[in-house]
Every structure is written in C-alpha cells, then in structure tokens.
Amino acid sequence: RGRPMPEPCNAGFEAAIRAGTITQADVWARVRLALQQGQVTLAKSLNKHLPEREAPDPKALDQALSNPRLFLERRTGTFADRGEREVFMFALLRLARTSVQDAAARWRASAGAFTADERHYVWGQLGYWGTMQHDPEALSWFNQGGRLTDAQLEWRARAALRTRNWSELLASVEAMSEGGRAAGEWRYWRARALKAQG
C-alpha cells in the first residue's frame, strides 16, 4: 500500500521488519508505492528502515514534489545509489502528469543509468500518463514497460482502441490476469479484435 497505515498497524510493521518477515526489498517497494501516490511524508518515514547511505534524501524529495521540472534540470552526474534513482524517477513521473513528452525525452537521456526493472517501471508509467494525455507514443512506451499490471494493460488496450490497433488490443487483453480478461468489456473487445483480424 502507498497510504499511511493506521497507528496499530505500525507496531506490527516494525515487528515484521525486526523478524525479517518484511525485507528491505519490501520496504523499497513500499517507498515506490508511496511516491507513486504522492505520499512523500510516508516515503520519508520509511528511511529509518533503509541503509542511511542509500535512503532517498528528504530535501530532494521535497524539491522533486514542489517543482519536478526544476529538480530534473538541476540534476546532473551519475546516480550513485538507489535512493537517488528513486527520487529522480519520482520527479520524472510527477512531470509526466502534466508534460509526458518532456518527461519521456528526459528519460531517454537518463535511462541507461538505471536497472532493467527501473526502466520497465518508468516506461510503463509513461505509457499510462501518455494514454491519459492521448499521446500517440503511449503504446510504444507501454511496450518498453516489461510486465505490466492489469490497470496498465487496460490503459494500453484503450490506447490501442483509439487507433484501432487490433493486434495491440488483443495482446493487451491476453496479457491481463484471468480476472482482468473475464471483465465484460474486455471479453467484448477481445472478440472484436479477433473478428477484425479474421
């Protein structure tokens, strides 16, 4: 979850971390979810569970939240640790909400410094924001996104529908989970795509 937990849950979360039930990878996943939902305070509170040298810089998170374009313009050099990369991705995707082409151009210039999983994550998010803004490149961004969630696949299918790209629509529906494919609208559009392709 990306939202703060009720207070009683925090004690359980802390205990699970001490017991090793919740791993550092789980904490990073929660940081990313929090940032994806704009919950910067929650993300900063999770720093205490990460190695100090790798945790996202709280001041950088605030700057990325308040003015992502300016933050990205001032960001130069290498990405020494995961915390720096997470803050950069956060700023980039904040920018994508209003200017997805600008965000995509900045990502193309920087993506080589990121892991394959990070690149897939950002391309999938750019595809989502591109679809929301009716950007014609949204499908190509989705196609660089690796494994997509059902929600992303639904938006990829909608992007394909706008251009009557039946093969992309079919691929999107067939990549959904069994529950996603079972939804009435996607059963209908899958059938239309199959018919259109003969």
Image: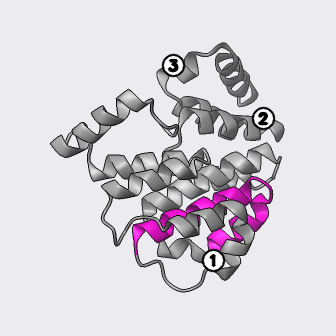
**Relative depth, front residue between 94 and 123:** 94
Residue 19 located left or right of residue 52:
left
Q: Of the numbered discs in the image, which one, if any, rests on residue 179?
A: 3
Query: Is residue 101 rendered magenta in the image?
Result: yes
The mark nearer the N terminus, 3 or 2, is: 2
Residue 12 rendering spot, x and y as whole percentages: 28, 32
**Compared with residue 58, is residue 44 higher up or lower down, i.e. above or below?**
above
Q: Which amino acid does label 3 sit on?
A: Gly
Which of these two is toward me, 29 or 5?
5
Q: How far apart are marks 1 and 2 (CA)?
A: 30 Å
Q: Name the residue under label 1.
A: 109
The mark found on residue 161 in the picture is 2
Mark 1 vs 2, N-terminal side:
1
Q: Is residue 144 visible?
A: no
Real-space CA distance between mark 3 and mark 2, rounded to the nearest whole angstrom:
20 Å
Mark 2 is on which residue type? Leu
Image-quadrant location for residue 164 = top right
Q: Nearer the viewer, residue 137 or 6?
A: 6
Answer above or below: position of 7 versus 26.
above
Task: Tell us which disc is closer to us: 1 or 2.
Answer: 1
Q: Which amino acid does label 1 sit on?
A: Ala
Q: Residue at x 32, y 59 (%)?
A: 50
Residue at horizontal 76 percent and vertical 58 percent from the top: 100
Quarter the C terminus occupies: top right
Q: Give the range drawn in magenta.
A: 81-109
Question: From the viewer's perspective, is residue 190 above or below residue 162?
Answer: above
Q: How far apart are marks 1 and 3 (CA)?
A: 37 Å
The main secondary structure of the magenta stretch is: helix
